Structure formats: C-alpha cells, structure tokens
Amino acid sequence: MLRLTQSTKLYTKVIVMKKIGFIGLGTMGAPMASNLLRQNYEVTVYNRTDEKCRPLAEQGAYTSTSPREAAEEADVVITMISNDDAVRDVYYGESGILSSLTDGMTVIDCSTISPALVKEIAAAVSAKGASFLDAPVTGSKPAAIDGSLVFMVGGDAAVIESVTDVFNTLGKKVIHMGPNGSGAVAKLAHNTVVGINNLALAEGFAIAAKSGIPADHFLELVQLGSAGSKAAELKGRKIIEGDFSNQFSLALMLKDLKLASSLTDGIGMPSPMLNLAKSLFQAGASEGYGDEDLSAVVKCYEAWIGQKIGEQQKQ
C-alpha cells in the first residue's frame, strides 16, 4: 500500500502594533491614552503638567519632555488640546511636533479648534511627508473612558482606513465628513446644537420649578415626550441633584460656541440661536462656573427664579 503524506506548515500572523505618541492628557485625552495602553499599544505621552502623565506611566506608558519627543518614534501622533493657541504651540513651538515628522507618519488631531487652523496645520504636516486627519469627537468623559466616542473626521479616506484599528480602540464610530477642515466644521455645528439643547433643558426646568412642578416628574415627561434629547439623558439628573462635576466644562462649551460664531460670521450666515447660547454661557462663566460641567449654566436660571431646580422634591 502506498501511503501519501502531506507536510503541513503552520503560519502565524504577526500583527505589528502601531507606536502612538499621545499629546494632551486632560479630561478626554487621559482616558483615551489609557484605552490604547489597555489594548497593548506602545504609547508615549506628553502633557504640559507632568503629574497628569504619572497614572499613565504606571499603566505602562513612556513619558516625554516635549511634543517633539513624544512624536519622534511614533507611527501615529494623536493630539487632544484645549484651544487654538495651545494647539499652535504644540505643533509649531520650538519643541513642537512638526520638527519630528517624517514620511509615512499619521497625525490625528482630536481637538476642537478653528477650521482655519486645521487647514493650516494639515498643509504643514503634508509638507513633511506625513498625513493629517482632523478628528474631533462627540461624547464627553464617560464615552472617552469606555471607548464609545464618535469621531467626525476630515481628511483622505485611505488615511482613515490605515488607522482604523486606532479609531476602533478609542470609539464606536468614524464618520468621514470630507477633506481636511470638515471634521472641525462638523464639530462646531454639532456643539452649537449641544449648547442650545442644554439651555433649552435648563429653561424648561426653570419654568416647571418656578411653577411648583417637581423636577423629577418634569424630567420624566421630557424623556418620554418630543422634548427628549441627549441633553436630558446626560444632564437631567445632574441638574436635579446639583451635581456639576465636570464631564465637559462650561468654559470649553463657551470656547466652542465662540469658534462657531466666528465661523458663521466668516461664511456670512445669521446664527441668532448660536449667539444667544454664547451669551448665556458667557453669563455662566462670568459667575465663576467655567470649570464646572456645562450643565452648571442652569445655576443662572436658578438665580433668576430664586430657587434650586431640585428643591421641590425635597420638600
């Protein structure tokens, strides 16, 4: 009898994990970097205040002394910075990212900044042979922690595809908005709606509370009726309980509304609701609520009606 034997080779697929440089470890950036570490990416972090790097270093991150150093050995550089001035310094400063970019690197900026600055940085990154995506997010601190952010991205579709693994680690959805700058515009339009919705919720609460309706009853109505919104879902209980611990600060919302107002001025579009929202969040900031959650704007209404929103059910 002839026995035929077959030699079988076992192939192992080797997945090469991207090296990540992560710059900006604030309310959103720190949990995002933490999620990358949990998925075994090699992450080098940088933040202007060193103490914010320590928890991530304990989780396994490398630390750096400058944005340039954080980006030097990275395949992907992610920035999550608070405003235009800080972003400009991180990219263009003496120890900025641009000085360390090389061919084939991808830079993802998740900050909420002006579309004009986004386009400027995209051109500077491209001149270095690297790729740039503006990829701001929706979803506040809880979504950053559990990896359920939604990214609105401006840039080339092929570049987005090349970093899908990174996006999937940090969020649940990527929406391609168009070329560079489109992500930034989408974020400002989105946060215009967020700001207005939160003010609508606060104003409704104030009307109900001043008229003697228990706040929890009113919230139940809002959530079951046509007034339901993410604002009610995420901020309703915080308002009733007077819990203004920061998930997304009032100061950052005001900053975004100012950027959105500049954008609408630039494109010649009237935006009366946006400008009213900006004024009301400015009032909240003037009262000292800037570092609290954006829902703290309801305290302006509480001052106007002379009572706390949650006061009725405590009686």
Image (cartoon, rainbow, N blue to C red):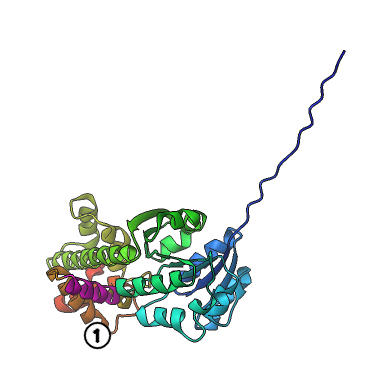
Q: Is residue 266 magenta?
A: yes
Residue furthest toward the right? 1
- Can you say which quadrant of the picture contains the N terminus? top right
Residue 85 position by quadrant: bottom left
On screen, residue 258 versus residue 128, left or right, reads left
Q: Magenta region's main secondary structure?
A: helix
| Amino acid found under the numbered disc labelled 1 | Ser
Residue 115 position by quadrant: bottom left
How far across and down, in percent of the image, does residue 262 sit? 22, 76
In this view, 47 is above or below 42: below
Q: Secondary structure at mark 1?
A: helix
Residue at image position (58%, 58%) is 39
In this view, 213 is above or below 255: above
Residue at image position (25%, 56%) is 229
On screen, residue 166 versus residue 116, left or right, reads right
Q: Which residue is mark 1?
A: 286
Residue at image position (44%, 56%) is 160
Q: Is residue 8 magenta?
A: no
- Can you say which quadrant of the picture contains the C terminus? bottom left
Nearest to the observer: residue 146 or residue 120: 120
How far across and down, in percent of the image, does residue 295 sit? 28, 70
Nearest to the observer: residue 238 or residue 266: 266
Residue at image position (52%, 79%) is 99
In this view, 308 is above or below 216: below
Residue furthest toward the bottom? 94
Nearest to the observer: residue 91 or residue 165: 91
Q: Which residues fall within the magenta stretch?
A: 254-267
How many dots with numbers? 1
- Can residue 307 be seen in this snapshot? no
Label 1 crowd (10 A; few <14 / some 14-19 / many >=20): few
How far across and down, in percent of the image, does residue 97 sit? 50, 77
